[in-house]
Amino acid sequence: MSAEATNPATPVPLTAGVQRRRGRARLDLRRLGRAALMGPATRDRLPDAIGHVAEAHRAHYPDADLEPLRRAYVLAESSHRGQTRKSGEPYITHPLAVTLILAQLGAEITTLTASLLHDTVEDTDVTLDQVRAEFGEDVCYLVDGVTKLEKVDYGAAAEPETFRKMLVATGNDVRVMSIKLADRLHNMRTLGVMRPEKQARIAKVTRDVLIPLAERLGVQALKTELEDLVFAILHPEEYAEVKALIDANAASEGDPLGDIAGEVRGVLREAGIAAEVLIRPRHFLSVHRVHRKRGELRASDYGRLLVLVNEDADCYGVLGELHTCFTPVVSEFKDFIAVPKFNLYQSLHTAVARPDGQVAEVLIRTHQMHQVAEAGVVALRNPYAPPSEEPSDRAEDERVDPTRPGWLSRLLDWQQAAPDPDTFWSTLREDLAQDREIAVFRPDGGTLGLPAGASCVDAAYAQYGEDAHACIGARVNGRLATLSTVLRDGDTVQLLMGQDATSGPSSEWLDHARTPAARIAIRRWLATHPAPSAPAPAPSRMRPARQRQATATPRREAPDVMRPAAASAVVDREGATVRLAGCCTPVPPDAVTAFAVRGGVVTVHRVGCPAVERMKEVGRAEVGVRWGDTAECRVTLTAESFGRAHLLADLTEAIALEGVAIISATVEPPTQQRVRHTYTLQLPDAAHLPALMRAMRAVPGVYDVSRAQHPAAAAH
């Protein structure tokens, strides 16, 4: 897959000099790979190389049948015979190195077989039909998937399309990406004879796309080495500085991290917890990040402790012992066992301090968790093999991926809608930069996986696709919320959809959309529905009289509701002026009470009005009151809605169709996409009020209609 030559100047393994002294749990793929492959470039060495692959595979699968691996090696070696890399090495060393990397991670035999053959169809006379006949459909599918990604032109136009194909292939089988990542790792190791500008170009693509993909697939063993190789190429001065720091620490007297590890072993031994305590040196880029964050580094900052146990419960037992026997650094505690990361990662993170000021970061996990943390999806073996005890009723060409994470499904969805390569490329890089995922629940019990910081806008497009254009709001954990509301992990989201099929998003939605699917859909709708250059006049379907009624009046007009209404309230005080209180706007047949206030005025309130208690507390005289025979009444209603075009006109029309006259209307300025409308209305019959309120609630965008409450109006 590559003609790059070996680079003698490629950075040495990050833990050189530290590995022997402290031990290391992390797979050192590079050291083993070079030991197996980078000897004299003769055919006599190749059987040793395939022997290393077999040995690494047997470490994970003791009873594995290695015959497919042997046949794949024979075919690959004979097919590539005579081909060399730029360094002069036989070309077969490249697929062997890629296969060794995957074998050490625990890949199953199908992936290893495809890895050995991944360049044969592209670079030799071997055909896919031959591969299918000799090794079966799965191996053929993987070889074909990787072959489609070959001959990468790192130009601006070709690169996006190459990665678009890669993502589609990954969506159908994540093992394609496993082979691609191992291939890139070996090519990055052997990048030295390339021109500096080409090294930098390849390193930038690796940094922007492949490293985030390795992170999301959980393949930390590949990700960390890729990060360091990119770091050495793009930032050689900082790399040299970090290397000098690591070398100086390795040569220094004392080993505080080793001392703490010994104390931890003693504590766990006394507690009766079977555990393996290892020192895990930080890789170069990690040391660089800690150095920038903290300044001067302590000796214990160059590594972390890794505690491996057998059972999940033992992880929390270890945590309890550490926090009891050492001083815990509370801010450093994270529980990724109860809440795993989106890339399958599980572990407890904590930090403990000694009296001398040395602080050790500690990772606690089971052996199985550690395997998944290092190898990610590769550690899942063959995720496509149907359970042996259950019959498979799938069609042979139907590939179901039970391990496909939510981020990959979303990525595959939006990439199809990306209008051009530039948009796809920039959006892909933004999407991969999201390093944390949350899960929110739908009312039906389903879940939506979203990036951290996603809003209700993102949830709408994740659930409904382009039908989300008609979304008007949401309920988050049962409470009304605007579409701009940022969601948190575990929230329950009910999306409210409007009835107007022609409605669509506003440009403000883009300010709250974090997911590419939402942004692309919104931009496409806005491009096909340009906004008018000036505010549109009121719809022609409104008659002139109705337009005058709908004109918003200043807030100071609200006291109009205190004027005598047509609905007559008869009070037991002769000659008194009767007013209906604006705080609760009573209408027949409400249960009411009345109070005498200044100037011989009696105000009538609903019995449940909060102002009634205050009237009694200040000693206002309660006056008997009953409704008269007049059917008409005046009432003030407040409509709460989400903002959209023509909402005022539609509400006004709904009121008029109920035969109700509008005395005044007030529309407050929108806040967070919400709009409040206050109407003072003259009803021909108070009994018609419930029907009127139902009609107003039926207007798309309106989520609540209530009787007006004006606390200030109650202070008489």
Image (cartoon, helix red, strand yellow):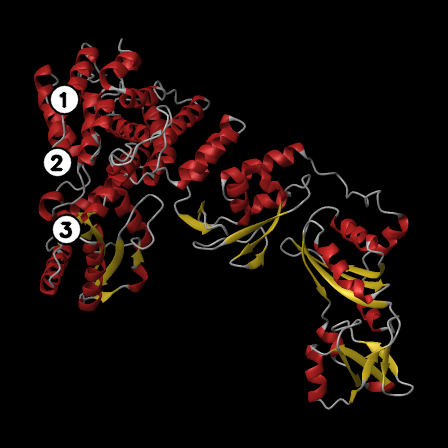
Inter-mark Cα distance, 3 to 1:
36 Å
Position of 583 compared to 20: left or right? right
| Mark pair 1, 2: CA separation | 16 Å
Q: Do the residues labelled 1 and 2 touch (CB within 8 Å)?
A: no
Q: Quadrant of the C terminus?
A: bottom right
Residue to which mark 3 is pinned: 278
Q: Position of residue 476 (x, y in %)?
A: 53, 56
Quadrant location of the N terminus? top left
Q: Which structural element holds mark 1?
A: helix
The answer to whether residue 225 is visible is no
Instruction: Determine if residue 202 is in view.
Output: yes
Q: Number of labelled discs?
A: 3
| Amino acid at dot 1 | Glu
Amino acid type, label 2: Ala
| Disc 3 and disc 1 in contact, CB within 8 angstroms | no
- Classify 263 as above or below 33: below
x and y, in percent, of residue 512 in the image: 55, 47
Mark 1 nearby-residue class (10 Å; few <14, some 14–19, many ≥20): few
Would you say 688 lies left or right of 701 here? right
Q: In this rendering, which labeled residue sits more in front, label 2 or label 3?
A: 2
Residue at mark 2 to residue at mark 3: CA–CA distance: 20 Å
Residue placed under numbered mark 2 in the picture: 59
Image quadrant assignment for residue 283: top left
- The image position of residue 227, as x and y in percent, is 29, 38
